Image: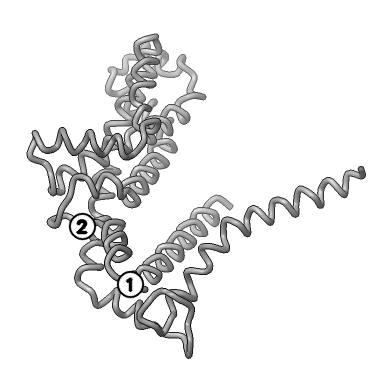
Amino acid sequence: MPLSTFRIFFQTGAWLIVAFLVLPLLVVVPVSLTDTSYIGLPKEHLSLQHYVNYFNSPEWLHATWTSIWIGLVVATCASALGTSFAIGCWFLSDKASAIARWVLITPILVPPVVQSLGFYRFWVKLGLIDTSAGVILAHTLLALPYVSISVFAALANLDRNIPRAARSLGASVWQTVLAVIVPAAKPGILTGFVFAFIVSFDEIVGVLFITVRRVTTLPKQIWEGIQDNIDPTIAAVATLLVILTLIVTAIGALRRT
């Protein structure tokens, strides 16, 4: 078979995969513009009533703000703890540090329902049920592996002789960490921060287990909207999130070019 035929075959397959992933997201856009009071395509005309309902709804705006500020706090805490852990393991580089790395990754391997059940049982004893502190602590534990993996990847190419040279020239341990290790790990720290924020912002299973009424994040508000009356405002929120994601992605791509 000619090489050009192989190229056409793989290109067609790639575009089909892209269409399979993107088309379900695009369907949300016309649904968000429906003129009906239920989820469906517009019948008579396009309407922005569900976008207006979102921006005029204290419940939706409060849930959005709650997810944003909790996500930022979680990303900050997870970045600080995950970076410290990764740098410490990088310095040690022994069997114990390797075991610690595998232990930290376990939250990714454990099913979310099992994690959430464990959080619930432990949080009841600590009095953290239905509190912002409880959600932040749970999300931080879930986001830690993503930060540590990103920082480990950033430090993989760092020559160990560079910190040794800094130490031999009179730099203290903290000066070596701040002037040599942290700058080398900066790309991983930034990537981990973004991943930690996304993990917190999208997390729903744990929130359903450890919150009742006092703490409502955006995913929980969407879940309740689906459970109650399938509010088309959900489609408007989903469209706004897709647009925001595309904007952030485009900015990141333009900054790299």
Q: Which mark is residue 216?
A: 2
Q: Which mark is residue 32?
A: none
Residue 147 or residue 143, whichever sits in front: 143
Which quarter of the image is occupied by the N terminus?
A: top right
Which corner quadrant of the image does residue 2 belong to? top right
Q: Are marks 2 and 1 in contact (CB under 8 Å)?
A: no
Residue 135 as seen in the image, left or right of residue 247: left
Q: Residue at x 32, y 48 (%)?
A: 203
Residue 49, placed above or below residue 150? below
Check the image and tell me how it is coloured.
Answer: one colour
Residue 70, placed above or below residue 109? below
Residue 186 or residue 23, whichever sits in front: 23
Q: Secondary structure at mark 2?
A: loop
Q: Residues within 10 Å of mark 1 (few under 14, many from 20)?
A: some
Nearer-N-terminus badge (2/1) = 2
Q: Residue at x 34, y 31 (%)?
A: 107
The residues tagged by marks 2 and 1 sit, at their Cα atoms, a distance apart of 17 Å
Residue 256 as seen in the image, left or right of residue 81: right
Q: x, y percentage for residue 76?
A: 27, 42
* Residue furthest out toward the front: 228
Which corner quadrant of the image does residue 182 belong to? top left
**Amino acid of disc 2:** Thr
Residue 94, placed above or below residue 110? above
* Residue furthest out toward the top: 95
Q: Which mark is residue 231?
A: 1
